[in-house]
Amino acid sequence: MRALVRRGGLVIAAAMAMVPATQGIAARDKPTDALMTGSFRVAAGQARAALDAGDVNGAAAQVSALLPSNPLENYTAAALRMEVAAKRGDPQAKRKALTDILESKAVPAGQEPYLRYLAAYYSYYLGVFNDALAQINYARQMGYNTTESTVLLADILIKSGKPTEGLALVDQAMEQQKAAGKPVPATWYDRAIGVAYKQGSWGEVAKWCERKLRAYPSEGNWRSCLANYLTAPGVDPQLQLDLYRLQAATGAMASERDYRSYSTLASAAGYDAEAKAVIDAGRTAGKLDATEVETTKLLKTVKVKAPKTIAALPAQVKKAKAASNGMAALEVGDVYFSLGQYPQAVEQYRLALSKGGVDPTRVNGRLGVALARSGDLPGGKAALAQAGGNWTNVAGFWNVWVDQQAQAKTGLTPAMSAPTS
């Protein structure tokens, strides 16, 4: 966000360096203007000519020698100082010149709200957040409620230790941007994600990541968002597995670490065939070296265990059907899920829910993914909506994927459709 504000500020500063000075000097040329003395008009004109010629030092000397004696001259001198400061890249001097402009009592009608916004920006840039907050609120109270002012206020609040209020304004700025028919820059989402991450607010991290992925669904963004969420404390191995599974589904497996972590988790959970498939995929993708000791050892183990796990499934299915509760069906469903046999997994998850004795928020999370991966996207969304507890955020990420599959089926890419807030 700061980078955005700064970039916008540089554009604004360039405009500011020209507009007030031009308006002030134009005003002195009016024959009916009796407020500009002849000597001041000549001296200001010389400073203007020096600036136009690129002689910044000469202009600075001439501007510092000006002796304004009334509001219009105060305004003109301050505007010239602003332009000198802009050409020198001196934010302290820009901020001081803005104060003088605002105190000149000759600001053109309707320009003060914008100038207050600029004052807020330069105070923010200089780290004077109390003044920045006062100035931006003043500007907005005077009617300067642009998207850029909302973005700036959001960042001021975040820098002032009020991240919750700041993020609410990031949200408002995004709505303003969309209402204007403009795309929301990816860096706005990144700023919000970064603030939520720093707070340790993992629900907010997930929310902002989901919004970014709807607007910018690249493989790199999927990996970044899922990798960030995987660092959350207390994410149990089953949740981690579903995040890695989603990373694989989105084509976002990008490193040796991704494949090693995924395969290790799958093996530890007893999903040996899945672990083997992940290692094989990593080697095919050139991300896992066939001579690497750790994965070679793991592969040797899971290759032996995987056939036994698969062979035991028919008996486990019978056991689950006869069980008094749904725990056995849930376990069998998870094994089918790990094998990519999603219709069979759906059957077992539904059996588990019907028998009870299981956490429905967890079962519905897996059921939703299994349905979607079986081709039943509406059914998948319906089940994912019933996920809860620790599975809420993971289900939210998968819900984004489901929506993108639906968009692909209709011939639209996610970027062609309106981002969902």
Image: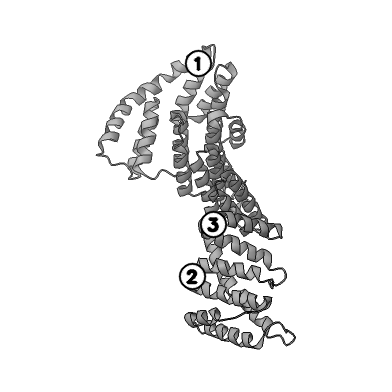
Q: Decide which of tag 1 and tag 2 comes sooner along the chain.
A: 2
Report which residue position mark 3 lands on. Answer: 128
Q: Are marks 3 and 2 in contact (CB under 8 Å)?
A: no
Taking the spot 52% from the left edge, 35% from the top edge, the residue there is 394
The secondary element bearing badge 3 is classed as: loop
Of the two numbered discs 3 and 2 on the same chain, state the one appearing first in sequence: 2
Q: Residues within 10 Å of mark 3 (few under 14, many from 20)?
A: some
Dot 2 alpha-carbon crowd within 10 angstroms: few under 14, some 14 to 19, many 20 or more = few
Image spot of residue 375 (x, y percent): 56, 36
Can residue 273 be seen from the camera position used here? Answer: no
Whole-angstrom CA distance, mark 1 to mark 2, is: 73 Å
What residue is disc 2 on? Answer: 89
- Residue at 45% from the left image edge and 18% from the top image edge: 314
Q: Quadrant of residue 277?
A: top left
Q: Is residue 61 above or below residue 387?
A: below
Q: Position of residue 415 (x, y in %)?
A: 57, 52
Label 1: element kind: helix
Give me the disc on residue 320.
1
Amino acid of disc 2: Gly
Q: How many marks?
A: 3
